[in-house]
Image: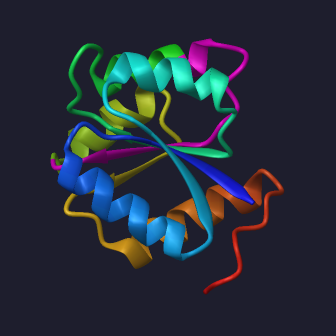
Amino acid sequence: MVNVLLVEDNEMNRDMLSRRLTKRGYVVAMAIDGQQGVDMAVSEKPDIILLDMSLPVVDGWEAAQKMKADPASQNVPLIALTAHAMASDRERALSAGCDDFDTKPVELPRLLAKMEALLKAKGIAPPEKA
């Protein structure tokens, strides 16, 4: 079982992505703002985190820094999800502590490939393809 923490404030994006990941065998926990995401990164002990960068309460940039500063969540792979597709946004996400970066709208095969690469690097086998 691979546990994913999806931190996304847009209900439609959250619903679509969580259903598609669940269908592929992932167990998805969801947070709707950056602070809830930071808290759940510790309480849920996810194997990987998908983090929207445009979030209420605490934005994704700050949430990523907090997650990577906390010993309980610092080693969890973190993928930034953002509609901002500029090279500078990618650099900003990586410097905030994200391990990878993906643009919205999400192309599921591309995102899954990034997730699987990060999970394999941590010695975690991705779910078998459904």
Q: Is residue 81 above or below residue 27?
A: above
Q: Is residue 102 above or below residue 126?
A: above
In which quadrant of the rendered view does residue 104 lie? Answer: bottom left
Q: Is residue 62 above or below residue 128?
A: above
- Judge left or right: residue 88 versus residue 79: left
- Judge left or right: residue 120 versus residue 8: right
In x, y percent, where is residue 22? 52, 67
Q: How many marks?
A: 0
Q: Which residues are magenta?
A: 67-83
In which quadrant of the rendered view does residue 52 lie? Answer: top left
Between 80 and 1, the residue placed more toward the observer is 1
Name the residue rendered at 74%, 62% in the picture: 120
Name the residue rendered at 24%, 39% in the picture: 89
- Residue 107 colored magenta? no
Between 88 and 85, the residue placed more toward the observer is 85
- Quarter of the N terminus within the rendering: bottom right
Name the residue rendered at 60%, 63% in the picture: 26
Identity of the residue furthest to the right in this view: 123
Q: Is residue 10 above or below residue 67?
A: below
In which quadrant of the rendered view does residue 35 lie? Answer: top left
Between 109 and 121, the residue placed more toward the observer is 109
In x, y percent, where is residue 14? 30, 51
Asked whether the viewer can see residue 64, the reply is: no
- Judge left or right: residue 82 versus residue 25: left
- Quarter of the C terminus within the rendering: bottom right
- Residue 69 colored magenta? yes
Asked whether the viewer can see residue 128, the reply is: yes
Name the residue rendered at 38%, 73% in the picture: 108
In x, y percent, where is residue 102? 34, 55
